[in-house]
Amino acid sequence: MRKNYIDILKGIGIFFVVLGHVTRIPELRVFIWNFHMPLFFLISGFLYNPDKYPDFKGFFKSKFKSIYIPYVLFFLVTFLYWVVIERRFRGGEYSIFHQFIGLFYGTLEGNHLYFNGPLWFLPCLFATELIFYYISKIKNKIGILSVLIISFTIGTLVQLYNLNVFPFGLHTAFFGLVFYGIGFISKEQESSFTNLALVFKLLLLVGCMYVQIMAVQNGYRGDIETSPIYFIPIALCGILFWAVLSKLINKNRTLEYIGVNSLIIMSVHEPIYRFLIGGFSKLSGIEVNIIRTNLTYSILISITCIIAIIPIIYVYNKYVRKRINTLSLF
């Protein structure tokens, strides 16, 4: 049974992803970076059902179709758009071959996804899911938590010694596994969370938002590479705030629609918002930097960007997704 509040949570999360890329307001960006990508790792772990996949081969096929093939398709489409159109206006500091390597490297490092940076999340999530398949076979929470601590330690050491050069974002996947695992473990507490009295939910909202605001005001950068110890609890506070709020909202068709199609929005929003900002700047005579450092403009561009993606969502769901699902692999 589909959970409305999870789709609402994803809808809120993907809106912040778009807004975080559109805006250049430092405090707002840090506030968003505190939780937005950990949120999607955690939701993925929360939704993971090991009983659905009795063997690794079936699991691999499922994730290959739902994550990796869309990554390849959206990479090629946005890459061609960059080659044919955007590269002429945005600048060609990276060669076409340099960017194409990103299809196989699948990570931001080396600027191989310069034309569409958010695509890094898909291969990283793919790697995270494949690794967690085996972690989920551990029969007790203590064992899983121990592996997550080890994963966090490895990720921290990788960052400390500047070894973040692995393909498919494996260096980030060590941290992604932490949130994925927390999501997986926390699903057992869903009923307790649901049955919390309203007053406690409101207190959680106030407390979690306070942590977020204090982090921003005290100069926290929202950067797991430089603050891995602080990043985990601050991110969890941010996720908990929006999870509680989503549960209270419970039903909202717009946010649910956006959440259900968050993968598509994640994959194509960057070139679209750049086009919108450039077009608005030309028509209005307002400098791009002013647009991106103004909260109202940033929100309006973000909303317009998501609306502009709706035809792509329609085409993908009606024609592409069905064909991917019917593919016979291996």
Image (cartoon, rainbow, N blue to C red):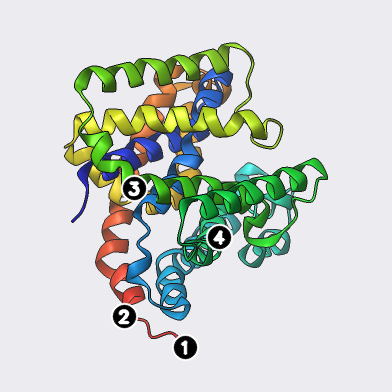
Label annotation for residue 123: 4
Q: CA distance from mark 3 to mark 1?
A: 33 Å
Q: Are marks 3 and 2 in contact (CB under 8 Å)?
A: no
Which disc number belongs to residue 187? 3
Instruction: Give the number of the mark in front: 3 or 1.
Output: 3
Any part of residue 264 in sight: yes
Disc 4 marks a residue whose amino acid type is Pro
Q: Secondary structure at mark 1?
A: loop
Up-down: is 71 above or below 162? below
Left or right: where does residue 64 sit relative to residue 324?
right
Amino acid type, callout 2: Thr
Q: Position of residue 155 (x, y in %)?
A: 69, 47
Residue 271 location, x and y as percent?
A: 50, 46
Spot occupied by residue 226 in the image (x, y as percentages of width and height): 71, 32
Circle 2 residue: 326
Of the numbered discs 3 and 4, the one sitting upstream in the chain is: 4
Question: Residue beneath label 1, please?
Answer: 330
